[in-house]
Amino acid sequence: MQTKIISLSRSVVLAGAGLLLAGAAGGAWADEPSLSILEPKGGATVTSPFKVRLAAHSMTTGPAGKLVPNTGHHHLLINEIPIGKGKVIPNDKTHIHLDQGQTETELSLPPGKYKLTAQFADGEHRAYGYMMVNGINITVK
């Protein structure tokens, strides 16, 4: 009987290790929060005005004003560096707040090269940090 218990325990341990390995191979981090710029694509040449579409993954998008766990709203930074975790994102012409929970906006920029950076923040505009940042370069003609 003891041999069976040891054998069974060993099988369970090996099966558990197999599940862990399968999970890691299948993208165990797929549920980590992240941010995407869906439109325009990086490297695109656009004409003003143009649409910018954003998406948060593994977080809920909602309006600013309330602190709700795993929820926030989008900000679009134009030629600015990302704001550090826990710091309030400024509100000016180069730090655009989509504080009604929007996932898209329209921009009109003069011709030139730009770095667009999407950043996600909590209900009080405090940045979630670099895991919730995504940037692209575009050209406006």
Image (cartoon, rainbow, N blue to C red):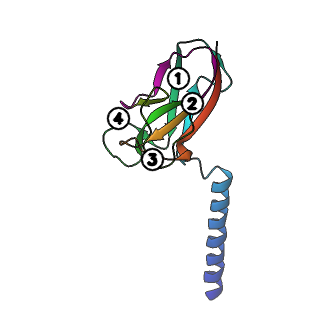
| Looking at the image, residue 55 lies above or below residue 129 | above
Residue 86: percent from left, percent from top = 45, 50
Between circles 1 and 3, the one closer to the viewer is: 3
Disc 4 residue type (three-letter): Pro
| Looking at the image, residue 28 lies above or below residue 61 | below
Task: State the separation of the CA atoms marked 2 and 3.
Answer: 22 Å
In front here: 41 or 91?
A: 91
Disc 3 residue type (three-letter): Lys
Q: Residues within 10 Å of mark 3 (few under 14, many from 20)?
A: some
Task: State the separation of the CA atoms marked 3 and 4.
Answer: 18 Å
Q: Which residue is mark 3?
A: 87
Task: State the separation of the CA atoms marked 1 and 4.
Answer: 18 Å
> Pointer 2 and pointer 1: residues touching (CB < 8 Å)?
yes
Q: Which residue is mark 4?
A: 63
Per the image, label 3 sits on a secondary structure element best described as loop
Task: State the separation of the CA atoms marked 1 and 3.
Answer: 24 Å
Q: Quadrant of residue 78?
A: top right
Q: Which residue is mark 1?
A: 52
| Looking at the image, residue 94 lies above or below residue 9 | above
Which numbered marker is on residue 37? 2
| Precedes in sequence: disc 2 or disc 4 | 2
Q: Is residue 112 magenta?
A: yes
Per the image, label 2 sits on a secondary structure element best described as strand
Which numbered marker is on residue 133? none
The magenta segment is 99-116
- Residue under the point 60% across and 82% down: 5
Residue situated furthest bottom in the rendering: 2
| Precedes in sequence: disc 3 or disc 4 | 4
